[in-house]
Image: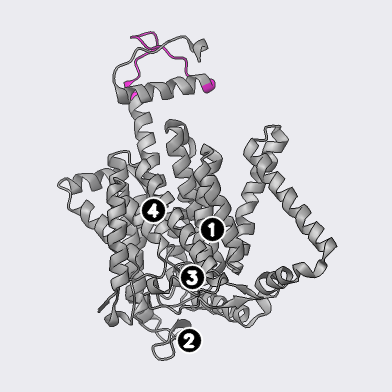
Amino acid sequence: MQVSLPGLLICAAILVVAYYSRGMLIIGLIASQAFGATAVMTLTFLGGSSPLIYTIFAVLLVTAVAARRRIWFDLGTVFGSIRPVWILTSLMVYAIIGSWLFPRLFAGQTAVFVQSKTRGTVVEDSLAPVTGNISQTGYFILGGLAAIALCTLLLHSNRIDQVRRGFFLWCGLHTGMGLIDFVGKNVGAGDLLAPIRTANYAIITDAIEAGFVRITGPFSEASSFASVSLACLAFCYSYWRKTKSPLAKWLSGILLFLSILSTSSTAYVGLTLVCIPVAFSMLASVLKGKVEREEMLIIALMVVGGTAILGISLYKAEALDPFVRLINSTIVNKADSASGHERTYWNVKSLQSFLDTSGLGVGFGSSRASSWPIAVLSQLGLFGSLMMAILLCILARGLGAAREWVDPETDAVVASVRSAALASIIAMSVSGGSADPGILFFIALAVVSATRARALRGMTALGRSAPPSGHGTVNVVYGGSAGLALQRQRFLAMCQGPVQFNTDSDTE
């Protein structure tokens, strides 16, 4: 085992910042995602696996929650209030069993793609137990345990402000390091973030695409940086639209700039897919005749940008040639490139391995694909994929009807976290190689599930405490938006103490 000094120093710095931000465990775990190629150590006995620094914060979170005096009572409350936790636990158990059993049960019966121990590249080989079964499954189980621990904390008390600060710290760190990498490479200073890339990955930070320097930030390659940029952009944009936050607006603009200049196919395809619901939302606003100022600003910027591009092309057509070559290289001709053929072959063989194992899968960490849904199907099989799909649907649903029973700030944070996780899933569906959805997925699942459970619990408590009609000091007609608002007012008042309510529904 080899310890990474830069990784330990960054962990210490994050701990100090998170401590003074009054949320060491939650803020530290979220902010640590910004360092996507910084390892704390290298585990030589696991084939050189190098855990990233987020694993330290996930272990600290799980350990701190497990050390609570009422841990069994807290776990009972979590499992009794949040039904998705049962699905998550079942999936974790299935992943452990599958990672040990399936590579042995179907050994030699199908082909998989694994990391070569001698060549350092991905090679095709017959199915057999590999170190990835241990390391990849370990990361997945740690993410699941972190989600349960986070549910315990969020269900016990309202910590949504810690979640908000953690996500803004993460987005700020990612944006800042992206700008440092962009400026450093374009002024000739080189890779300024090289000292913090200590993970045992293939580091591709000096590549050039169609004459453009690829931005990698603190990550090992442009596609990883683009995936996280897309998630941060989704969080900041959603939060800006709901709260009109100036910080979120400026972060959104810079992240969009970095995503475009990352020269990654993941960024361009992901941005296209993420913009689809945004476009539908703006179209709905236009049809309703309720266009907000932010939407008018976006439309104006698009018109100005389109006009500028048209003007440049008319004045000097060859000025846009580098951008045309970039689009052709990363999108139009990507499927015909050697990399495109290779990744397509990985996906085809991964689907074949699903069929070769009768739909059971090759086991977690046994193989590599080039798309997250295909990786899930080939490694977890049909049963595991169904459980993962259920968790994804729960995340996509968000708070649902429970949104009416949370304050606007909580609704904005939960919706933004959900958007970030879904954007991350979209990016991994373009170029993800592992079945692990990542720590962001587990954090978002915990935030959505725990907040929904708290809202439903409060709504149920309010319903039980409501006196019969015409009895006592409260007599509210529950109907329409006014009745719903009065119910919500009663719920908030219950949390603050006895209050006399105005029973005249016309006053709302």
Does dot 4 land on a helix, a strand or a loop? helix
Which residue occupies 40% across, 91% down? 118
For residue 264, say whether it is visible: yes
Question: How far, Cα to Cα, is label 4 from label 2?
Answer: 33 Å
- x%, y% of residue 214? 57, 71
Residue highlighted by disc 2: 123
Circle 4 residues within 10 Å: few <14, some 14–19, many ≥20: many
Residue highlighted by disc 3: 375
Check disc 3 and give the amino acid type.
Answer: Ala
Check disc 1 and give the amino acid type.
Answer: Leu
Q: Magenta stretch?
A: 464-481
Q: Does the magenta stretch include residue 232?
A: no
* Viewer-side residue, 164 vs 383: 164
Check disc 4 and give the amino acid type.
Answer: Ile
Residue highlighted by disc 4: 443
Residue highlighted by disc 1: 230
Q: Earlier in the sequence, mark 4 or mark 1?
A: 1
Front tag of 1 and 3: 1
For residue 79, say whether it is visible: no
Front tag of 2 and 3: 2
Which residue occupies 36% across, 65% down? 140
- x%, y% of residue 11? 30, 62
Secondary structure character of the magenta stretch overall: loop
Check disc 2 and give the amino acid type.
Answer: Val
Q: Which of marks 1 and 3 is nearer the N terminus?
A: 1
Which quadrant would residue 3 be assigned to in this image?
Answer: bottom left
Q: Which of marks 3 and 4 is nearer the N terminus?
A: 3
